[in-house]
Image (spheres, grey):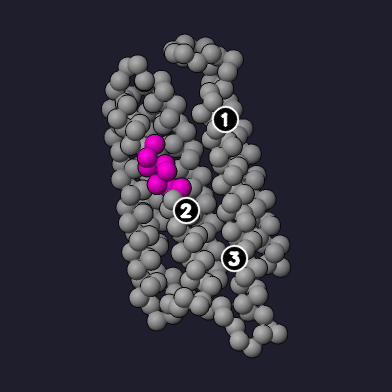
């Protein structure tokens, strides 16, 4: 049953990725003839950055799918009824994880606002929304460090407990992907306002919003996994 749930999570990730590909592959200029400011991009082309994001999201989906599968298989092995020396012990879930989830949800909403403002050509709102989204993401990452500290200081902490190792690995890998997004976020903030890179900035904001939505979904799956086990 555990393997079935794990493979179901992998399939769900693939479905979400396919939906994102379909969303990103839309060409707004085909339905809105008024949009003529395409800069150096050809109307018949999909920007290479979008294709790169599709590929990257596919890799992330596979990576976390494998982690989820490994988590369930290791947990099942640790709870084996044939082994009287069970090494898997569930750890207390830090309450700060709920606050962190709220931070990440807020950052995703802010990124969506920035994307909407970018499509309207509202640079001021795009900049402020993008800044809020990034700051909330940094708050999430700091909160994750606090959660690490709480787990480390708990009575259930043990280097021999695979549940502890999985908690750190899952949250660390997710956080590393957010740090990569923060790097792009910082560069985008610097470029906003430069007319020569205005179109590129709008494209980057669009891709950032999709990336943030996706990592929010990944975190919700991981958080649900941790809470249920």
Q: Quarter-wise, where is residue 83 in the image?
A: bottom right
Residue 135, compared with residue 86, is above or below; it is above
Q: CA distance from mark 3 to mark 1?
A: 30 Å
Residue at image mark 3: 71
Depicted 171 relative to depicted 198: above or below: below
Where residue 68 sits: x, y (%)? 60, 60
Q: Quadrant of residue 9?
A: bottom right
Secondary structure of residue under mark 3:
helix
**Residue 171 image point, x, y percent:** 46, 59
* Mark 2 residue crowding within 10 angstroms, few (<14) / some (14–19) / many (20+): some
Depth check, front residue: 161 or 35: 161
Mark number displayed over residue 174: 2
Asked if residue 4 lies left or right of residue 31, the reply is right
Q: Give the residue displayed 45% in from the left and 31% down from the top.
A: 206
Horizontal relation, residue 40 to residue 141: left or right: right
Pointer 1 residue: 51
Q: What residue range appears in magenta?
A: 177-184
The answer to whether one can see residue 125 in this image is no
Q: Earlier in the sequence, mark 3 or mark 2?
A: 3
Q: What's the distance in space between the residues labelled 2 and 1, CA to CA?
A: 22 Å
Q: Residues within 10 Å of mark 1 (few under 14, many from 20)?
A: few
Give whichever of 125, 8 is nearer the camera: 8
């Amino acid at each position: 049953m555990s393997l079935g749930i794990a493979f179901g999570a992998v399939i769900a990730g693939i479905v979400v990725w396919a939906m994102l590909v379909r969303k990103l592959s839309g060409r707004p200029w085909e339905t809105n003839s008024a949009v003529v400011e395409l800069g150096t991009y050809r109307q018949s082309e999909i920007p290479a950055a979008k294709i790169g994001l599709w590929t990257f999201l596919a890799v992330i989906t596979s990576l976390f799918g494998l982690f989820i599968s490994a988590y369930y298989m290791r947990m099942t092995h640790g709870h084996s009824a044939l082994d009287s020396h069970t090494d898997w012990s569930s750890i207390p879930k830090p309450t700060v994880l709920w606050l962190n989830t709220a931070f990440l949800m807020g950052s995703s909403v802010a990124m969506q606002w920035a994307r909407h403002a970018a499509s309207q050509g509202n640079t001021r709102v795009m900049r402020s929304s993008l800044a809020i989204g990034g700051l909330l993401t940094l708050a999430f990452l700091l909160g994750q460090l606090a959660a690490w500290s709480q787990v480390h200081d708990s009575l259930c902490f043990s280097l021999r407990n695979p549940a502890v190792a999985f908690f750190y690995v899952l949250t660390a890998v997710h956080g590393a992907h957010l740090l990569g997004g923060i790097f792009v976020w910082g560069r985008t903030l610097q470029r906003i306002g430069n007319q020569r890179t205005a179109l590129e900035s709008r494209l980057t904001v669009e891709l950032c919003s999709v990336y943030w939505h996706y990592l929010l979904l990944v975190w919700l799956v991981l958080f649900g996994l941790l809470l249920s086990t």
